[in-house]
Amino acid sequence: MYTITLEVNQICNLCCTYCYLGDKTNAIMLEDIAYKALDIAFLNAEKHKDRRLWVDFVGGEALISFELLQRLTDFINNKALKRKIQVSYSITTNGSIINTKIVEWIIENKIQIKLSIDGNEEIHDKNRKTIAGKGSYSQIIENISMFKECEQKTKHWIQVAHVITQNNYYAAFQSVKHLYQNLKFTVIDSSIDVTSQWSKKQLDLLTAEWEKVLLYYIEMQKSERPFLWGIILDLLKYQDGNKKNSFCGAGLIQSYVKTDGKIYGCAANLGETGCIGDVEKGFFISRIGELKKSANSNEECSNCKIYEMCQNRKCIINMLVHDKKDMCYYEHKKIELWNKYKSKIVS
């Protein structure tokens, strides 16, 4: 399967403190750029045996450009039919924008929803505010019934994107429990804000929170309504150990296209070092080759005692922009959790 992420706009009605786009340009992706990006994606999907293409729409707030999204899915569906490619869709949204037409479009195209919620109202509103400075939690709650309708009719669980920052990490367990128990979400994807510099003390406290979630997760697996937690998927990767080729596959199995048509390996690095092509010239093959070569060439990493298990070093695109000792320490802490609970996680 080949995955392409289309950044359809850089417009948003929120002003979140940790937005990976930083200062947004208010640009909207031109249809011509989108079509050229999709042509590249289809060519790559045809190289894969399963002939599958995953199209992920992001912004800004992607749903602000709803009419563009409608035209793009029409284009993709027609092209997929002619070229016998199986297409799946996902979209990331802050949950503030939805209406009957959007619901119909999501259901018709069986689009999987990634909904950004950081916890209860107090925790969520610390970082996810409107441009006017008001918290956005209440807007999501007002719209939640329509998102739940999409979940029910597409048969795809909503994936809640839950971001851990330096002003909410102490409530990580409380936040996960709220999303699962109170808001009734089944898939919770917790991630840490890697743009900040974390202290060992903070990461120790966060690990203690993760351990609480792990124990809760294990307990709920025996219930009638278990949930899926993103950190568990991270931990399960340690089962495989080190693969000879640890290249992440940027350009080969996935790409991220910005509004201006530049192609990146993924959203982890949207700077110059993360650029691997553009829709006019295609991929910069030499650049992808350099990234692939560098995947196993970090001497400092190769001397580390957790080298064989480390997943952090495999995120080559991310490491180019974040040479961060704190994330190395965080990786050690996650491996400690894996070693402590792996028998219960995999059972």
Image (cartoon, rainbow, N blue to C red):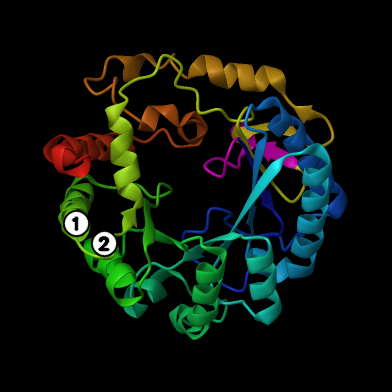
Going by the image, does 24 lie left or right of 300? right
Residue 133 shows in the view: no
Is residue 139 magenta-colored?
A: no
**Which residue bears the numbered disc 2?**
172
Residue 295 on image: x %, y %:
47, 19
**Residue drawn 18% across and 59% down?**
216
* Rendered image quadrant of residue 53: top right
Placement of the C terminus among the 4 image quadrants: top left
Find residue 317 and report its horizontal and vertical position in percent: 52, 32
Residue that protrudes farthest toward the right in the picture: 32
Name the amino acid type tagged 2.
Ala
Is 177 situated left or right of 251 in this image? Answer: left
Residue 101 visible in image: yes
Q: Position of residue 16 (x, y in %)?
A: 50, 66
What number is the disc on residue 192? Answer: none
Q: CA distance from mark 2 to mark 1?
A: 6 Å
Q: Residue at x 16, y 58 (%)?
A: 219
Residue named by callout 1: 209
